[in-house]
Amino acid sequence: MSGLEEFLAGQLAQIEAAGLKRTLRTLESAQGPEILCDGRRVWNFSSNDYLGLAAHPRLREAAAEVLAESGTGSGASRLICGNHLEHERLEETLAHFKRSEVALSFSTGYAAALGVIPALAGEGDVIILDKLCHACLVDGARLSGAVLRVFPHNNLDKLESHLRWAREKYPQARVLVLLESVYSMDGDCAPLREIVELKERYGAWLVTDEAHAVGVIGDHGRGLAEECGMASLVEVQMGTLGKALGSAGAYVCGSAALREFLINRARSFIFSTAPAPHTAAASRAAVEIMLSDEGETLRRKLWSNIEKLGTALKLGKLQSAILPVIIGEETVAMERSARLLQKGFLVPAIRYPTVARGSARLRVTLTAAHDEAALQQLLNALAEE
Ligand SMILES: *Cc1c(COP(=O)(O)O)cnc(C)c1O
């Protein structure tokens, strides 16, 4: 067994030498615009808690009530004895929110992707994905055993040539297109209308991951598919409950047959303990806020913050709450992030393998909970860089 420690030390030395060593920070506060991080109070510009719901009293109350009633654990998978009334209530509320026939919840977005994609495509099928798709979509696609084709980010011509190729080479195959609606490291949107048109023309199915769009984009934060009027044409709409919705877990929205099929075929759903009932209750409270005037007020506040920072940084019209400040070199991005942290701003550097080598960046994320003073101080700190 001594060989393992040697192997690990060698690998870690290589990671460190490449400037790619990752370490954990420790929080001792709730999520919010200011957090207690490694013992210091800092401005938080790194959270995906876009609407500030993670510490919202209504989510806390909803969770606490169910926690007192139902305890901490769900005991088994949904198919054994873990399917609590709270999961069903959450799924009904999600389907209503997303205006889809039904919803199915998963324990995380990552698990949803790993369950859904291999359930829908396998050996002999074709999966076509955008180059910037999140790791969970890439991993789900690889796990499926399908033939994979990647198109350059948002490149419709190349997507079309892959679709044509798939139809000619594998006339009987299921063809799946995987997209994010808002790309998580660049903050830009997919040209969804055009992609829906293409996948319809070639008889492919579309899976969209709305992780950074739900709660942020579209009427009441229903997402990009809804905003483009395309929701009814997207076969599988996925999203996380852990970002703008301030809780944990994920959803898949689609037809009743899709839900029934996934309950039977999505392995990450079948072979995993159900999320705790109080987590589902918190998620449902979040969706109810999204449907309320308060949700719209929070979303407007978020967009006003996005516009202010976008204008000040001359980034043009921003499409989401993610503002990438591209640096290039991994070590330079790390140094700038470390200097900002010293000044009291948590702005993470994102680097390979999360983004391509040489495209390291500072990734600023804004929330509705940031006030004018926080934005101004960040701008001052960035200007000094
Ligand atoms: C965060 C994220 C996920 C994963 O969702 P979790 O619920 O955090 O597991 C999936 N896709 C995208 C695009 C994400 O940004």
Image (cartoon, helix red, strand yellow):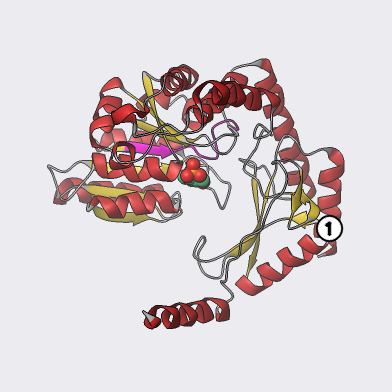
Left or right of 41 in this view: 260: left
Local secondary structure at mark 1: helix
On screen, residue 144 versus residue 112, left or right, reads left
Q: Quadrant of the N terminus?
A: bottom left
Q: Residues within 10 Å of mark 1 (few under 14, many from 20)?
A: some
Residue farthest left in this picture:
172
Can you say which quadrant of the picture contains the C terminus?
Answer: bottom right
Which residue is located at x 42 percent, y 18 percent? 85
Residue in the foreground of this view, choosing between 159 and 176: 176
Q: Quadrant of residue 142?
A: bottom left
| Residue 380, above or below 320 | below
Q: Is residue 58 magenta?
A: no
**Which residue is at 56% across, 72% downward?**
20
Q: Is residue 327 above or below residue 219?
A: below
Q: Nearer the viewer, residue 89 or 220?
A: 89
Q: Where is residue 16 drawn, in percent x and y?
A: 57, 77
Distance from mark 1 CB to nearest ligand 1 atom below 8 Å: no
Q: Magenta residues: mostly which secondary structure?
A: loop
Q: Residue 69: where, in percent of width, then height?
A: 53, 20
**Residue 158 appears in the picture as rendered:** no
Q: Which residue is mark 1?
A: 381
Provide residue 127's location: percent of width, then percent of height: 28, 48
- In this view, the residue in front, 277 or 204, is 277
Residue type (three-letter) at the residue carrying disc 1:
Ala
The x and y percentages for residue 212 are: 55, 40
Judge whether residue 212 is colored magenta: yes
Residue at the spot x=45%, y=41% of the render?
Answer: 108
Q: Is residue 383 visible?
A: yes
Q: Nearer the viewer, residue 327 or 378?
A: 378
Q: Which residues are magenta?
A: 206-216
* Above or below for 313 versus 48: below
